[in-house]
Image (cartoon, grey):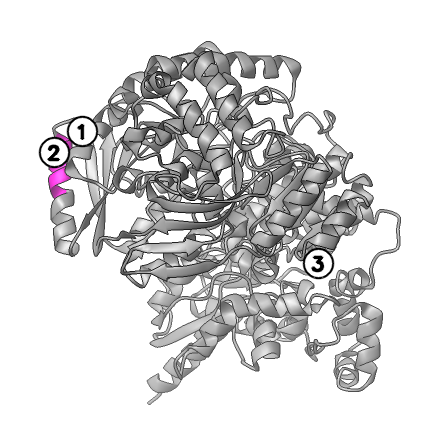
Amino acid sequence: MDLAAELRKNVRGDVEFDAASRALMTMDASNYRRVPVGVVAPRDAEDVAAALAVCRAHDTPIVARGAGTSIAGQATGTGVVLDFTRYMNRILSLDPHAGSAVVQPGVILDTLRDAASVHGLTFGPDPSTHSRCTLGGMIGNNSCGAHSVAWGTTADNVQHLDVLTADGTPARLAPGGEGVPAALREPVTALVARELARLRTGFPELPRRISGYALDALLPENGENWARAHCGSEGTLALLTEARVTLVQTPAARVLAVLGYPDETAAAEAASALLTHGPLTVEGMANDLVGPSARASLPRGGAWLFVEVGGSDEGAARSAAEQLCTAAASDGTTDHALIVEPAAQRALWRIREDASGTGTRLADGSEAWPGWEDCAVPPARLGAYLRDFRALLTEYGLRGLPYGHFGDGCIHVRIDFDLMSDQGIAVFRKFSTELAKTVVAHGGSLSGEHGDGQARAELLPTMYGPELVRVFGEFKDLWDPTNMLNPGILARPHRLDENLRFEVLPRTPPETAFAYPHDGGDFSAAVRRCVGVAKCRNTSAGAGVMCPSFRATGEEQHSTRGRARLLHEMLAGDVVKDGWQSDEVDEALDLCLSCKGCRSDCPVGVDMATYKAEFLHQRYRGRLRPAAHYAMGRLPLWLRLTDVLRAAPLLNLLARTPLAAVAKRLGGIAPERDIPEVAARSFVRRWRGRGDRREHGDGQRVVLWPDTFTNHLSPEAGEAAVEVFHDAGLRIAVPPKPVCCGLTYVTTGQLDLARATLTHTLDVMEPAIRAGLPVAVLEPPCAAALRTDLPELLPDDPRAARLAGLVRTFAETLESCAPDWQPPRLDRPVAGQNHCHQHAVLGDRADRELRERAGLTGQLSAGCCGLAGNFGFEKGHYEVSAACAEDTLLPAVRAAEPGTELLADGYSCRTQLQQLAGLRSRHLAEVLAEGLHTTRAEELP
């Protein structure tokens, strides 16, 4: 019986050997790529044991994997990948009195933290990937995070571990080793006894020593701590099935002190002195990592330390933070700020947490990569180390943006290695060798947080010497004599310059429809943007959008990262073999809502909506398309024809008859969906019939864009905008001929039609473009398409960029063209949806400020409504569409108090609310126009 069949026979969990499942697991968040033979998602420890037995019989390696956010390559492998996130992801118990919890390896850290928080507890280690990393992965890497200066590493917070050794023997790893089978305990104890001197002297003393095996934890004076010795072993010794971890008390209040310094070196040299004040964090970054908008929210300086201080209440925390700032001033701070409000603290922490992604793109757009992501030195040596590190970068002509855990002497950095050419890879190898020597010269560790993996394990002899590394190999062999657990990692490692994930990509950029201006016109480079940090796997939208389909399905292939991985493998061609005709990629992209959330929420700006449009364009060139592409992708054409023929009343009547079911079936429309009503008279027809209302007043002249949705489906929003703009004194013009942003053509990948449509639009709009007139677009996705898709589809037409620069949202138009206008005072709460494209491309600052001036209080929902233009109407998408709405929008509107105004500027969002909840929502323009009517009526004598 072959491997896959025997696994399916013996394992109750999922066994997947198809191309897509394998492609999704070829990479983690590192520079490395290894292709597994299959993927198993075990349901419990018995499944893990069964998979071990089958793979052992077939001489097939096993790689344990959590969220796949490892940065050194240890979550990739050529055998069977065990995915612990799918089923073994539960908190088995939580004892607030004992301050402990028992968890399975696939538990997400934030899930544990949320459960513990109701008792005033937390799990101390908190990597920046806390919203998606797993406890099993943290134990495997001995992860740390920002709060390690207070609460230590994962190893410091583990009580015991239940594991299965390579031969399937269960063991409980704890201090003393009583739960370890004698067949393993006795030879390991003998190894430790034989190497006592080397183990007592061979490990550097520093808080972030993560590299190598923690064999010194097995010394008698360290309590023979088998759990601690296992932490950081990167899945090479045994497979974790359960862990008891320590929970720590969280301070009742926290204050964030942001300290400014002249430069990075000054901040680094000051960090260790702050530890005497007992801070919770001491994090550092320089201004080359912080964008202009974020920099404006920080105190004056060229580098900053984020120092969090706790207290029994806000007053105590503030007092402690003020004392720390006073002491820090004597070490040369340029300025400081105390951040007390939790939301403001979270906003600043997001800058730091996203650095693992934002650091992959330098200011000029150059790519930067991990590999030397987290070296650590004694904190007092950090300033000197950073000077030497910067000098080494300069010597090799490299650039990077250091940041990280300054209080622990741990530095993260992405470096602009050229990993696509033989010469660049040679530089990568030589630089790595020299940097390892520099780290060791400062008494440091090659890894201070993320483990050695393939990135650094080859260089462990530089740090520990060949004899101690030989002991590491013996230790590995005692646990795993046949080398089946994550071979090539830590002990007898692969070279740091082999298995690079870039070597399989084409060197010539494929021909594409989009210009990819931020990636040098190269679709491969655009796909390379995804470095695997997996923010798209967040289980909560928070203040963002990305990735609604992952939150709805929980499946990797429906995350932004999963889709990027499949596109990478499509370009590579050895796992996903059919190029643009790949069914695996098509299936993964099918549930992409084209919400563009990743364009803003992904730390590296992956734009999966654009990649999906490109893929569909290439896949269906010269081929018959799905029915929905013709029915909804060409919606502007059909609606314009309906208006010309005055056929709206007839169509609306037919939509309420049994013929509607036939039409939906033929058009690829979900049977669960109602066909929206078409306006009897379009907005443009109404406008042309009211010549007296076209232009008046002496204010700014503005072009009101008659988008397809406003024009044919929601003309009342256009009418309302006219009233508001007139009240603001604006002079309104409407294009003399039909114009279109091409949105529906883009989302269905009909990019030739999109370009033709946009070229016609530019011809019509040319006088307005020459005159530099602001263009007010009421429909957020249409405004976003004009801002982004237009110049990226027509990069050689200078009119495209100029029109994109003229586009304004409704609120932006009022802000820029009528800044003194005062909206009617409405004084009521609001709920509803902030359109995903507005969040991702346009921003909603002007909208929030306009609502505030009108007395409309409260926040609109983040996330995505789930309809997303044509997506929610397409057959097969209804369940996911509804699940996306249930993520944030529908719970928020259900919880709204009576009298709450429901707002949704996007027609799709309004339709989703109507069809799923039976609730009427309106465009902000409609609400303000109604307020103007009321105000005028009240002013009449």
Image disc number at residue 744: 3
Q: Secondary structure at mark 3?
A: helix
Distance (Cα) linking label 3 and label 1: 58 Å
Q: Residue at x 88, y 51 (%)?
A: 623
Q: Amino acid at mark 1?
A: Ala
Residue 324 magenta-highlighted: yes
- Which kind of residue does numbered mark 3 sit on? Thr
What x and y, as percent, mark residue 104? 49, 53
Location of the N terminus by quadrant is: top right
Where residue 738 sits: x, y (%)? Answer: 71, 61
The image's mark for residue 327 is 2
- Marks 2, 3: nearer the viewer: 2
Q: Position of residue 591 (x, y in %)?
A: 68, 58
Quadrant of the rendered image containing residue 931: bottom left
Sequence-first tag of 3 and 1: 1
**Residue at the location (60% across, 77% down)?**
916
